Structures are given as C-alpha cells and as structure tokens.
Image (tube, grey):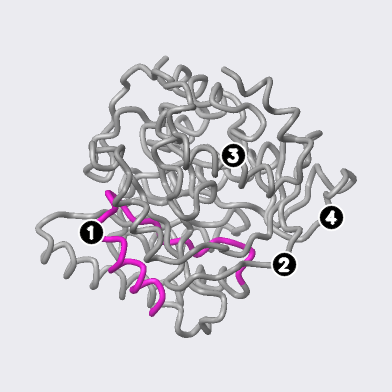
Amino acid sequence: MLYPLLRPLLFSLDAEHAHELTLGTLAKHPGLVPQQRIAANPVRVMGIDFPNPVGLAAGLDKNGAAIDGLARLGFGFIEIGTVTPRPQPGNPKPRMFRLPQANAIINRMGFNNLGLDVLIENVKRSRWVREGGILGINIGKNADTPIERATDDYLIGLRGAHPYARYITVNISSPNTKNLRQLQGADELNQLLGALDAERRKLDAAAGRVVPVALKIAPDLDPEQIEAIADATVRHHIDALIATNTTLSRTGVENLPHGGEAGGLSGAPVYEKSTAVLRALAQRLNGRVPLIGVGGITEGVHAKAKIDAGAQLVQLYSGLIYRGPALVADAARALAR
C-alpha cells in the first residue's frame, strides 16, 4: 500500500486540512485507491448479512462524499455522518489535533456537515451502495436546536435517512455539541428512544422493509448509567449499541503536545475505557442486543479483543489515520482466525 509513503506528507499538514485533502481525493478519484481484497467472513447482525465484521466508523465521511473510494479499502460496512437536518459549520478552527506519540486524536469538530439533503444526494450517486454495499447513516441534532427539542431533529434525520440506509445510528454521545450527552440520562433517553421506535415502526411498515436503529454511546459512563442505557435499548427495541464514541478523559496524554485541547479523545488511549464499557454492556444485556465495538483499535488484536468482550462487529477510524488501509486487512485477518 502507498499509505506509509504518503503519511509523512499528510502529517506535515494541519490535521483537518489533511483530512479534507484525502477525502476530496477519494471523492473525485475513487479509482486511485487500490482495491483491497478481504476474505469473506460473513456475519449476520441486526438482520443484515455483513460480508465481514470490520466497518468504518462515522465521522470520517460526514457527508457521504467518498463512499466509493472508502469502500475499496475492503470494509464490510461503512457508516457515514454524523449528519444534522440543516447544514452547519461546526466549531471554530483549529478543532482537530494529532497526538502521534499516543496514536491519538483530539477533535472538537461539532457535527460540521452540509446537511441531510446533500448527504442523501451523495448516497444516491454511490455505485457501491447501488450494488448492495451496507451503509449506515449516523444522525444527530443541530447545535442551535434546544436540547428539549432534540427529538424533533432526530425524527427528521430518521425520516430522511430511512429510504437510503441499511441501518441508522442515533448519536447522543459526541462531547462537542453542547448538552448532547444529557440525552443519555434515563428520562431523556426513554423519551427519545420511545419516539424513534414509534416512528421507525411507521416508516418500516410504509416501506415494506426493516431498517434497524443503533444507538452510539459515550465511554464516560458510570455502572448505573450503563445499566440504564442497556435496559432502555431493550425496552424500546433498539437493534444495536455502538460502544463507544470519544472520551473527555485525558489519561495518558496530559503532558503531550495538544493533550490539553478541548474535545473528544480517540485512538489508542480510549481503547481500555471503551472496551470496559463494551464488556459491561455485554454482561448486562446477555445477548439481547447486538454490540458494535469501536474505540482505540490500532491493530488486529484489538479488534479481536472487542469481539471477545462481546461485540459482533467492530469499527475503525482513528487507527486508520496512523496505519492506513493495512489496519482494515489486519483487523479482518484477526477476526477470521
């Protein structure tokens, strides 16, 4: 793969600039990416047959602009977003920082995206989607929508994404939208999930097909919160839990350059924390809700550890920044073994 040669050039650029340059190239010239062949390792989760259990996490391609290029890396599924009903610029720049000494990233992007309509048009153009690629769409709320009206935004996202997604993820765990994590509280979560479950049933009935709904949660949860979230997912028929998003903790990076930046920390330092939440959810749920493990996977053994902790699928993001496409193959091999 070319990535080891390209990485020094990309790392010489501002992190967000490098991200935009890479994504723009993949969007305009998907064929430049060598097709990475991943051995079939099918797994059925949420009623969907995944060709392999290694997926791309949301956040890398917020607008679904580079689906076909990213698909050439061999992912079993791709999740795009987080998308909000209306376009929004996100937080002021700079807002993304590499911590290479720790194989980590801190970001405070703030759901910057071009809005639901643009994402849908990009999905319609994707050849990979038309050919049956498994696409997840991750939905969130606009920053200027009051938290007490957050459900309205999630319902808009659900309705808009439903015809085009194989599954939909509800993101209530980003630390970069004010008060968003408040929706993980028991009362707020029950209200939100109850509304989404009722609307999803109507949409499924009208469309004649089931679109599963997953919930993405934070790693910064105490045992009582983890139990409440697990119980709520069962109560409201949520089809999967994605554990986890980025952390507010700075354990292990406090003294590194950029270690004190505000935002969510991802990459290697979140591995233990996210896996502990995953394990706790697995114990509480006892197989009643499938789990998707994400957070800190930088080599294949980490992907295997997520499965051993109770996940049925895994997702990659920050590890790709440091290892490139080789990480997809490494994770797939580890899970095939």
- Tell me which residue sits at (39%, 74%) in the image: 192
Q: Is residue 31 left or right of residue 161?
A: right
Q: Which comes before the other along the chain, label 3 or label 1?
A: 3
If the image is split into quadrants, where does the C terminus sit?
A: top left
Q: Amino acid at mark 2?
A: Pro
For disc 4, the neighbor class at 10 Å (few under 14, some 14 to 19, many from 20) is few
Q: Which comes before the other along the chain, label 2 or label 4?
A: 2
Residue 260, label in figure: 4
Q: Which comes before the other along the chain, label 4 or label 3?
A: 3
Whether pointer 3 and pointer 1 mark residues with C-beta atoms closer than 8 Å, the reply is no
For marks 2 and 3, give the CA distance: 21 Å
Magenta part of the chain: 152-177
Asked if the magenta segment contains residue 44, the reply would be no
Q: Amino acid at mark 1?
A: Pro
What residue sits right under mark 3 in the picture?
22
- Tell me which residue sits at (38%, 54%) in the image: 137
Q: Amino acid at mark 3?
A: Thr
For numbered disc 3, what is the local secondary structure? Answer: helix
